[in-house]
Image (tube, rainbow, N blue to C red):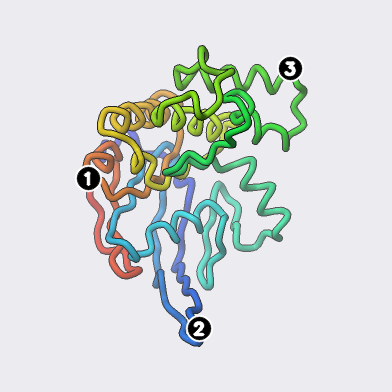
Amino acid sequence: MDASRVHPSLVSINAVSKAYRRGNQLVPVLEGISFSIAKGEFLALMGPSGSGKSTLLNLIAGIDSVDSGSIVIDGVDIATLTDSALAGWRAAHVGFIFQFYNLIPVLTAFENVELPLLLTSLSRRERREHVEAALSVVSLSDRQEHYPSQLSGGQQQRVAIARAVVTDPAILVADEPTGDLDRVSAEEILQLMAQLNSEFGKTIVMVTHDPRAAERAHIIRHLEKGVLNDVLS
C-alpha cells in the first residue's frame, strides 16, 4: 500500500467472534477476527458463500452485534451502545449501499435520497441543498423527479449511493453493489465508488464475489470459514 495514503485507524476490530443458532446447534460464523481499517481506506472483503463476510460487514455497520470482542469506530465501541443509541449512531455515521438498491418505488429519486435526512434536525431548505449536492455527485441532477421504475439499474444504484452519502457518513458499507448490474453499469458504479474514496476521502468497506470489483480496492481481505486468511494490497 502507498505509504502516502496511510491514515490513522478509523475502525478497529478486536478478537471478534459471532455465531448463530440453528435449532439446537450453535454455528460459528466468525472466529477471533482482528484487523483495522484506516481512515480513507477502500477495503474489499472476499470469500466463498458462508465465509462470514456479510456478517462481518453487518457487524461493522452496527446492524448486528458481536458475541465477543469489540468493534471501535472513530473512538466509539459500538458494542457498548444501547439499541436506541446504536440506531442514532448508525444513522449519522454509516452509509449503506445494497445489491438490490432498496429504493422505495413510490418515492422519487430526490425523496429516496432525502429519507436519511428526515431523521436529522436539518431544515427543509438544508435538506434540499444536501440532496441536490448528493445527486450532483452521482451525476443524476436531471433525474431527481424520476421514480425508480423510470431509471435503469445503474441509475437506481447511483440514487442508492447518493442516499448513502447524503448524511456525510464516516464509513460506507457496500454489500455486492454491482451484483445486479450488467458489466458496463457495474464499471460505472465502481468508478463512482473509487471517486468517492479518492476525491471525497470516503472510507469504504465492500463485500464482493467479483475479482474485477475487488481490484478497485486498496486492500483485499479474504475470509474462509470465519477466519481471516490473508491480505493483498
Q: CA distance from mark 3 to mark 1?
A: 42 Å
Give the labeled residue for mark 3.
Answer: 125
The crowding category of the residue bearing disc 3, from other C-alpha atoms within 10 Å (few below 14, some 14 to 19, many at least 20), is: few
Q: Secondary structure at mark 2?
A: loop
Look at 27% across and 43% down and name the residue there. 214
Number of the label disc, if any, that sits on residue 175:
none
The residue type indicated by label 3 comes to Arg
Q: Secondary structure at mark 3?
A: helix
Identify the image quadrant of the C terminus. Answer: top left
Q: Quadrant of residue 155?
A: top left
Q: Secondary structure at mark 1?
A: helix
Residue 51, placed above or below residue 205: below
Earlier-in-chain disc, 3 versus 2: 2
Give the labeled residue for mark 2.
Answer: 23
Q: Quadrant of residue 78?
A: bottom right
Front in this rendered view, residue 104 or 53 = 104
The crowding category of the residue bearing disc 2, from other C-alpha atoms within 10 Å (few below 14, some 14 to 19, many at least 20), is: few
The percent position of residue 221, horizontal first and vertical second, equals 29, 54
Q: CA distance from mark 1 to mark 2?
A: 35 Å
Q: Is residue 2 left or right of residue 29?
A: left
The percent position of residue 39, horizontal first and vertical second, equals 45, 40
Earlier-in-chain disc, 3 versus 1: 3
Q: Nearer the viewer, mark 3 or mark 2?
A: 2
Q: Is residue 205 left or right of residue 80?
A: left
Q: Is residue 204 left or right of residue 228?
A: right
The percent position of residue 162, horizontal first and vertical second, equals 52, 28
The residue type indicated by label 2 comes to Gly
Earlier-in-chain disc, 1 versus 2: 2
